[in-house]
Amino acid sequence: MSRSEPPATRSVLVVDDDAALLELLADGLAPHGFSVTTATRAAEALELVLEKPFDVVLTDLTMPDIDGIELCSRLASSRKLPVIVITAFGSLETAVRAIRAGAYDFLTKPLDVEVVALSLERAASHRALHREVERLKLAAGETRRFGELVGGSAAMLGVYELIERAAPSDAAVLVTGESGTGKEVVARSLHQRSKRSGRPFVSVNCAALPEALLESELFGHVRGAFTDAHSARAGLFAEARGGTIFLDEIADMPLALQPKLLRALQQRTVRPVGSDREVEIDVRLVTATNRDIEALIADRGFREDLFYRINVIHMEMPPLRARGADILLLARHFLERFSKQMDKTLTGFDQTAVERLLSYSWPGNVRELSNCIERAVVLGRGHEIGVDDLPEKIRAYHSSHVVVASDDPSELVSLEEVERRYVLRVLDAVQGNKTKAAQILGLDRKTLYRKLELYRPS
């Protein structure tokens, strides 16, 4: 027979050859939010689980056809259903048999409906968590990869499309986005999909070298051009001939060097330091920055004419916090990489670790996530990464939700902290689009960028 009482939130199958007990449980569990289906034989129960989904099964131990231990074993192994075994003859040996068969819990008669309801709720919650982890694992197994880029979020699909469209041309590309979002990976993807893929890809960080050395690195120098110039050097533009040159942190290029770069791009020639001769160059230019160049232009920290030269095609890399489930896809990608490097067998993340990874804001973006997973692989001792393997700041992280309707002083924060959290929440909501965020917040882009600079960890 079958009973159900709306409104129900959990579906439970109760199996027992005692009709009176079945009726008692069906009536007693309905007020606790359970939709109860009953069966008097194990064979009937096996048919029912094929016909409809259940969250949990409650079965008697002693039945005329198949006993509860055997039923538990079949359901736990084939259907991944949590099973609670009940019996009038409780013993340690029986409990051990039930647990070995895959039982979630073991109860003895006479039954207390409140205790039964509590056990069923815990088992059903365990089932729900298991399903969610499996769903996320399945999603991770279907990872969208685009060369070295990993992710299937709407924001990343837009990046992939733009790379595909821009790669065949020689147009200059400016990649912007927060530090650690993968701007150099985008530059390499553009190169690999271009007609120049068989030629060199040369990368230089404009913020890492002083002005005199950066000029020499880019354009080359002749022997004797300066004190340590013991021999001539062609320079990176010449080294990248026929290929792609990637100028990272372009916004940090010294102002005095910017007109020389602009001239090189316009004339398609460079003049090595100390030389009076021009050398032809043939490169595709890709640049990147995590700063607001337009704000720098307004402050006279970057040349407007150079900006227009490098910004023919603009790509904005979304922050990791705006990429949703990509966080788990990337986490599994790094888990596989580092597990292989360290010769460890790690199959995934437990539920609590998944929750922490998905709730953390990742101010360091993909780079921070990579470091986090590498650390977890080093410290992990089981087959799964647990929450204790994650860094303390991720374990202890609190979301950006602001509590304002509270009488507890410990939950209240300063106005500065309220502003910080709200700005970041708006940025999350618009998937990292700073122009939209500035419009919603009533700020100009320059002011928003300055606030974000303050919010980023040093």
Image (cartoon, grey):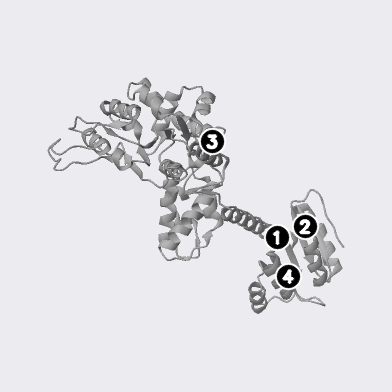
**Residue at 52% over, 24% down:** 439
Which x, y percent locates residue 415? 46, 28
**Residue at 50% over, 50% down:** 330
Q: Amino acid type of disc 2?
A: Leu
Question: What distance separates the C-alpha of mark 2 from that of mark 4?
Answer: 15 Å
Question: What distance separates the C-alpha of mark 3 from that of mark 2?
Answer: 44 Å
Residue that numbered label 4 is attached to: 86
Residue that numbered label 2 is attached to: 29
Which is nearer the N-term, disc 3 or disc 4? 4
Q: Amino acid type of disc 4?
A: Ile
Near mark 4 (Cα within 10 A), the count class, few <14, some 14-19 or many ≥20, is many
Question: What distance separates the C-alpha of mark 3 from that of mark 4?
Answer: 51 Å
Q: Secondary structure at mark 3?
A: loop
Residue 218 vs residue 341, the one in the foreground: 218
Q: Secondary structure at mark 1?
A: helix
Q: Amino acid type of disc 3?
A: Gln
| Image vertical order of residue 205 relative to residue 328, above or below | above
Cβ atoms at labels 2 and 1 below 8 Å apart: yes
Of marks 3 and 2, the one in the foreground: 3
Residue 392 vs residue 436, the one in the foreground: 436
Label number found at residue 120: 1
* Quadrant containing the N terminus in the rendered view: bottom right
